[in-house]
Image (cartoon, grey):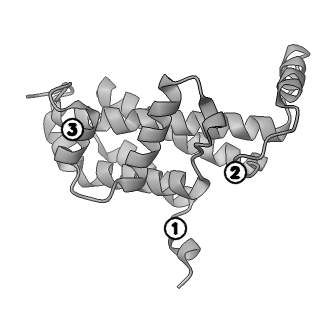
Amino acid sequence: MNEQKNKPSLLEFASRLFCLIRDLPKPEPVLETLEFVAGALYGLRKAEQLGLPPLGQVPKDYPEFMLCQIGRLRAGEEPENSWAAGFFFNSALQRIAMSYDRIPRLVTGEESRYGVPGRMQRLNQGQYGHWKALYEKFNDYKHTTKGTSSGVYVEWDEVVCSMDELLSLLESKQPEIKRRYSAGHPTS
């Protein structure tokens, strides 16, 4: 069986997220979290539409390429599609990684007792290995100056699987979220 056929599409993600936004309570913490997820979905859609180049494939003279893109912005023009696609892809990564930290706190109210990995492990009985790997790669990237020069990249399929795991967790935790935010604000 072709593994590619089993991967959910961005349109499927949009349908699932639509249902979550429609069905969950609407206090600020819930809406802000769903907005992170919606932004990630939009970032992935734009990256796909603009033709995200293969990861690790950067122009030979990237500083000059980047300067050219900023020059285009400075002139009131749009950057080249490859640069814009990378921008939207990286925005999606950031939002998915932030959700890894935020969703367990949204559901349980636990702030730091177990740390990010501990909170997720205690909350999530489903699959979240891709999401965890994305979070860890992004967290390392965020806290070091090496960047992608260290050879750490997040592949498209890993991001798609992460988004699937993220939405699956939100879907499975709807009863807890509804209970916790039933009066419009969190209950302990």
Find numbered disc 1 in the image and state the secondary structure of the residue it sits on. Answer: loop
Q: Are marks 2 and 1 in contact (CB under 8 Å)?
A: no
- Residue shown at the point (17%, 29%) measured from the top left: 109
Q: Earlier in the sequence, mark 3 or mark 2?
A: 2
Asked whether residue 15 is in view, the answer is no
Q: Give the residue drawn at x 89%, y 25%.
A: 64
Instruction: Name the residue at the top extreme.
Output: 74
Residue type at the position of mark 1: Lys
- The residue under label 2 is 48
157 on left or right of 74: left
Where disc 3 sits, the SS reads helix
Whether residue 170 can be seen here: yes
Of circles 1 and 3, the one toward us is 3
Q: Residue at x 57, y 56 (%)?
A: 10
Q: What percent of the width, then of the height, locates residue 129?
A: 37, 55
- Pick whichever, 105 or 171, lies toward us: 105
Residue 153 is situated, as x and y percent measured from the top left of the image, at 60, 45
Q: Give amino acid for label 3.
A: Arg
User: Closer to us: mark 3 or mark 2?
Assistant: 3
Which SS class for mark 2? helix
Disc 3 to disc 2, how far (Cα)? 32 Å
Looking at this view, is 40 or 138 the one in front? 138
Report x, y in % for residue 4.
58, 72
How far apart in space, not on screen, are marks 2 and 1 (Cα)?
15 Å
Mark sitting on residue 119:
3
Question: Which circle marks residue 163 in the picture?
Answer: none
Camera-side residue of 140 and 44 = 140
Residue 80 picture quarter: top right
Q: Earlier in the sequence, mark 1 or mark 3?
A: 1
Q: Which residue is mark 1?
A: 7
